[in-house]
Amino acid sequence: MMKRIILITLVLISALQVANAQKIKFKKGVVTADGKPILNYENSILTKEFTTLDDAQTIILKFIHDSEYTNGETYCKVIFVEQNKSFTSRSYIFTKKILVKKLLKSKLIDANGNFNSSKIDKFIMKYDEKVEDQKKEVHIIIR
């Protein structure tokens, strides 16, 4: 009986999670959440650029490979252009979809595409691993 109650509880929790999940789509330079436009975007191979619908704010997502900071590992950098703030992450690689979901969840961007710059510092603090602050270690072998 206890197993059945736990199973039902887990199913209900999962159903609520799915019901609250926003459907994010990227089409023709526009990002939509549940069918409503929230951002504009441009794609290139290693850079994704998002702008608010009024073009007042720009967020850049860069994928950096073979850097002096990571001994050849990939990391990502998210830049909030107008605020001149950024963060880097190696263990959590953001895709464009994951970044938009995280921006919405943190309320940096709302369901209408409004940008709340007061939430940037908390967002950065949550994900910043300061990859570019780490100095590359140089090993010299003397024989």
Image: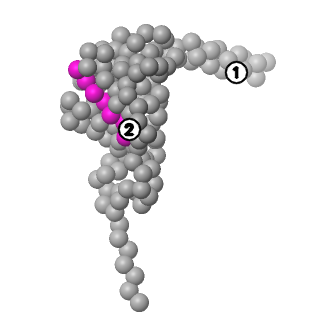
Q: Residue at x 50, y 16 (%)?
A: 22
Q: Toward which corner of the image does residue 84 lie, by quadrant? A: top left
Q: Position of residue 5 (x, y in %)?
A: 72, 17
Q: Quick one: label 1, few (<14), some, or many (20+) residues within 10 Å?
A: few
124 versus 20 height, above or below:
below
Q: Toward which corner of the image does residue 113 lie, by quadrant? A: top left
Q: Is residue 60 magenta?
A: yes
58 versus 54 height, above or below:
below
15 versus 61 height, above or below:
above
Q: Looking at the image, is mark 1 or mark 2 earlier in the sequence?
A: 1
Helix, strand or loop at disc 2? Answer: strand
Kind of residue sitting beneath label 2:
Thr
Residue 114 vs residue 45, the one in the foreground = 45
On-image quarter of the N terminus: top right
On-image quarter of the C terminus: bottom left
Residue reaching furthest left?
83
Q: Quick one: label 2, few (<14), some, or many (20+) residues within 10 Å?
A: some
From the image, give the main secondary structure of the stretch colored magenta: strand
17 versus 67 height, above or below:
above
Alpha-carbon distance for marks 1 and 2?
Answer: 44 Å
Q: Is residue 10 magenta?
A: no
Q: Which residue is mark 2?
A: 47
Residue reaching furthest bottom?
143
Q: Residue at x 44, y 31 (%)?
A: 96
Q: Toward which corner of the image does residue 77 lie, by quadrant? A: top left
Left or right side of 118 for 131: right
Q: Position of residue 19 (x, y in %)?
A: 56, 12
Checking the image for residue 6, the label placed there is 1
Front of the two marks 1 and 2:
2
Kind of residue sitting beneath label 1:
Ile
Per the rendered image, the range of residues in magenta is 56-62
